[in-house]
Image: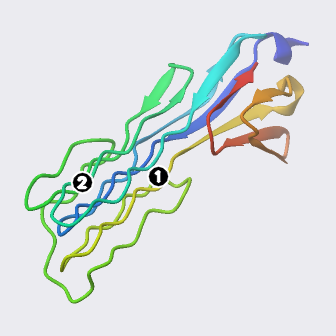
């Protein structure tokens, strides 16, 4: 079988989002990388790392960067930048926001899990929003899909492809 001898993978690798700054700006979204027709070696395990979103920050604190997501060191997506307090934002997959505005709403919204969104910045003394975790999605021609995974990805099919959605770290053996 030629497809099994020369497997290819389409991938989307999204990193964790940065945390918002408390009494400051919002965190940046996690970076992402994508490719179609990426060649993998048969019978070779490829590790998957799903980046965590950054935690929320306490009042008058700078947020933290989200963590990177990886597809077997082949590709790395950078975590989102931290939201700043005053003008202390950080670089990352997407940079964090400059300063928050005063508001009567002291709370902030967190990024959704497995979308890599940045956490909102807070104002008026509240805690910032946490960054959302990342995700790694692989699309493999079903004829070349080995069925060997770790980390319990969600497995679905779409047309002639098998889709693996990793919301936690694991691996796929081509």
Residue 4 picture location, percent across and down: 84, 16
**Disc 1: which residue:** 116
How many numbered circles are shown? 2
Above or below 37: residue 20: below
Above or below 97: residue 107: below
Q: Judge left or right: residue 125 versus residue 134.
A: left
Q: Which mark is residue 147?
A: none
Q: Residue at x 63, y 45 (%)?
A: 167
Which is more toward the observer, 18 or 157? 18
Q: Secondary structure at mark 1?
A: loop
Residue extending farthest to the right is 1
Q: Residues within 10 Å of mark 1 (few under 14, many from 20)?
A: many
Q: Residue at x 85, y 39 (%)?
A: 160
Residue 61: image quadrant is: bottom left
Residue 93: image quadrant is: top left
Above or below 128: residue 75: above
Residue 133 picture location, percent across and down: 50, 50
Residue 49 picture location, percent across and down: 55, 32
Q: Judge left or right: residue 62 versus residue 17.
A: left
Classify the position of the C terminus by image quarter: top right
Q: Residue at x 20, y 59 (%)?
A: 97
Q: Which mark is residue 96?
A: 2
Residue extending farthest to the bottom is 104
Q: Earlier in the sequence, mark 1 or mark 2?
A: 2
Q: Secondary structure at mark 2?
A: loop
Q: Residues within 10 Å of mark 2 (few under 14, many from 20)?
A: many
Residue extending farthest to the left is 87
Q: Judge left or right: residue 7 versus residue 75.
A: right
Residue 116 picture location, percent across and down: 46, 52
Task: For marks 1 and 2, give the CA distance.
Answer: 13 Å
């Amino acid at each position: 079988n030629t497809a099994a001898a020369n497997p290819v993978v389409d991938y989307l690798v999204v990193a964790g989002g940065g945390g918002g700054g408390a009494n400051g700006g919002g965190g940046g979204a996690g970076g992402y990388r994508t490719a179609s027709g990426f060649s993998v070696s048969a019978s070779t395990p490829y590790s998957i790392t799903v980046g965590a979103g950054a935690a929320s920050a306490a009042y008058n604190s700078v947020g933290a960067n989200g963590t990177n997501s990886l597809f077997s060191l082949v590709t790395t997506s950078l975590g989102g930048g931290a939201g700043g307090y005053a003008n202390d934002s950080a670089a990352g997959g997407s940079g964090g926001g400059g300063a928050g505005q005063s508001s009567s709403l002291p709370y902030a919204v967190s990024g959704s899990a497995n979308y890599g969104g940045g956490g909102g910045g807070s104002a008026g003394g509240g805690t910032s929003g946490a960054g959302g975790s990342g995700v790694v999605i692989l699309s493999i021609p079903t004829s070349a899909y080995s069925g060997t995974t770790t980390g319990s990805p969600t497995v679905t099919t779409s047309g002639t492809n098998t889709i693996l959605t990793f919301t936690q770290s694991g691996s796929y053996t081509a």
